[in-house]
Image (cartoon, helix red, strand yellow):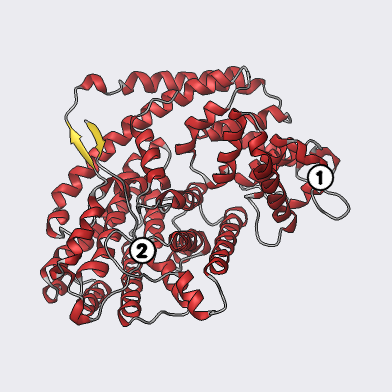
Amino acid sequence: MALHFESCIFSSKPQIVAPNSQLSGYHNPAKPDALHLANKWNFVQEESSNTQLYKTGNLSTNLSEKVEVVKNEVWKTVDESSFEGLCMIDVMQRLNIDYHFQDEIETFLEKQYAKYSSVGSGYGNHIHEIALRFRLFRQHGYFEPAEVFEKLTNKEREIRPELSENIKGMVDIYEASQLAVAGEDILAEAEIFSGKVLKEKVDCIDSHGDQFVKRTLEHPFHKSLPLFTARKFLGDFHDKNLWLSSFREIAKMDFSLLQFSYHREIGQITKWWTELGLANELVYARNQPLKWYIWSLACFSDRSFSEERIELTKPISLIYIIDDIFDVYGTLDELTLFTEAVCRWDITAVEQLPDYMKTCFSVLYNLTNEISSKVYQKHGWNPIHSLQNAWKRLCKAFLVEAKWFGSGKLPSAEEYLENGIVSSGVHIVMVHTFFLLGEGLTEENVEIIDGNPDIISSPATILRLWDDLGNAQDENQKGNDGSYVNCLMMEKPEYTREVARERVMSKMSDAWKSLNQECLFHKHFHSTFTKASLNLARMVPLMYSYDDRQSLPGLEEQVKSLLYDNFL
């Protein structure tokens, strides 16, 4: 099958809901035209000859053989205390092939950490070594104190000015500073200093280097998805290391196999979505299965998680559809009935709902039971109560927003954000991710997950604030919408819009520090789950960076490249 784009994609966010007399979106002739725009970014399936598909069996065999060669002939020759090993790990991560070498990487870093974890003189004095070792340790869950950067500071605890001439070193420091947690002033200073230097000098660097620096400033590695950045990184990497050609071969084969998996998975999701019939029942709701799939692809980025990607896309689709019911279709009375039905979780409750809500509730009810059954069969744990409670919280949050914006009265900024963290839908995504993974299924962990912990609320905060910061109107409605910026300016009349936006940026920075801290210090959850949380946060800028036409050209470009382009 071949997949084709038709246009660009849009986002979802809370909107003003009109009073009951004006709220029957199903009968509002102004809304269908606006809603039609929501469904322009889609894909069309065509039959294609098998010759256009990769022979995955042979390719997979070749890949496995090449990985073994690298492990036995390349990796084993690397000294466990060498800086070269760190560079190799960094390249593996940036090429998105590190999961093939997970055991080797962890063994290497464990030995490095045992040797260099103190802030003594043995840590190294070279700016590249200090920054890269610090970043890799923290990325892999080893807490390395920020004080290692004191080697690079003067008596005033500021980065030494002469280091600004080392552009590569400034890039390394800027990358390392992205893994800061709250209270690490030296990393905050390092980020400001290195960022300022790189912005000032970017125009003085050769054309190859300036693109790399610009990409680093816009998309530092820790806050980016290697899935989307690997191809450009390989174009930036010109060192003639003996192992680079081997990594390139592995990356090319891996990318080809991933593309084949994506096409097959998208075909299955399209079939499920078409047979479900919700797109026909709710003709003005969003019909964007490819966009929904990209969210699940971010959470489950490794090739082995094909089944999990398909299953996660299903509840993600319902987040968007239910959001449209609250934003577009329902009166407040109808939305209240729908929320009550979800809270009762009784299939007989559909009899009280309008026809368009009956189908949606039935799909939600059946899908949740179906996923719970699959999790139980595979992992021996029935998550039905956790999934039910997550949907109940989401619908309650949607209803709160409907009442706020229907009344025309904005809440306080913190009230808005507290509710918006739930209405972002991130908790739904991460709860399903947790149970689909099936790792760490204990009473304690399930209780933590049900409580919307920081590992979930932090990316939810990033999503909600980034969406608000873009000040983009949803494709489905015209008029003003609620946002943290608007609520803050109402609460603080002395704030200009620019000041309010700076506050939002600061809050997003704090949310990232909180997420970093969760990944470093709280070991309740498996690393695959924390990676999913990080990847969801990393996906947010692509999903919510609008241009003047309210489209998402960056996301469209990345997804087209991911699905169609060769590696290099």
Residue 26 rendering spot, x and y as whole percentages: 15, 68
Reading the image, the residue beneath label 2 is 13
Residue 476 rendering spot, x and y as whole percentages: 26, 61
Q: Quadrant of the C terminus?
A: top left
- For image coordinates 68% across by 39% down, the residue present is 201
- Mark nearest the camera among 2 and 1 is 1
Residue 527 rendering spot, x and y as whole percentages: 52, 48
- For image coordinates 53% across by 31% down, the residue present is 233
Whole-angstrom CA distance, mark 2 to mark 1, is 44 Å
Residue 552 rendering spot, x and y as whole percentages: 37, 48
Q: Along the horizontal axis of the image, is 453 left or right of 57?
A: right
Residue 179 vs 79, above or below: the answer is below
Q: Is residue 562 in view from this perspective? A: yes
Q: Which of 31 and 133 is in front in this view?
A: 31
Disc 1, SS: helix
The part of the image, by quadrant, that contains residue 363 is bottom left
Q: How many labels does the image show?
A: 2
How dense is the environment of label 2, judged by Cα within 10 Å: few (below 14), some, or many (20 and up)?
many
Query: Amino acid under label 2?
Result: Lys
Query: Amino acid under label 1?
Result: Pro
Q: Which of 209 and 561 is in front in this view?
A: 209
Tell me whether the residue at label 2 lies in contact with that at label 1, contact meaning CB atoms closer than 8 angstroms.
no
Q: Earlier in the sequence, mark 2 or mark 1?
A: 2
Residue 411 vs 455, above or below: the answer is below
Q: Is residue 414 in view from this perspective? A: no
Q: Along the horizontal axis of the image, is 18 left or right of 458?
A: left
Disc 2, SS: loop
Q: In which quarter of the image is the N terminus?
A: top left
- For image coordinates 36% across by 42% down, the residue present is 556
Reading the image, the residue beneath label 1 is 161
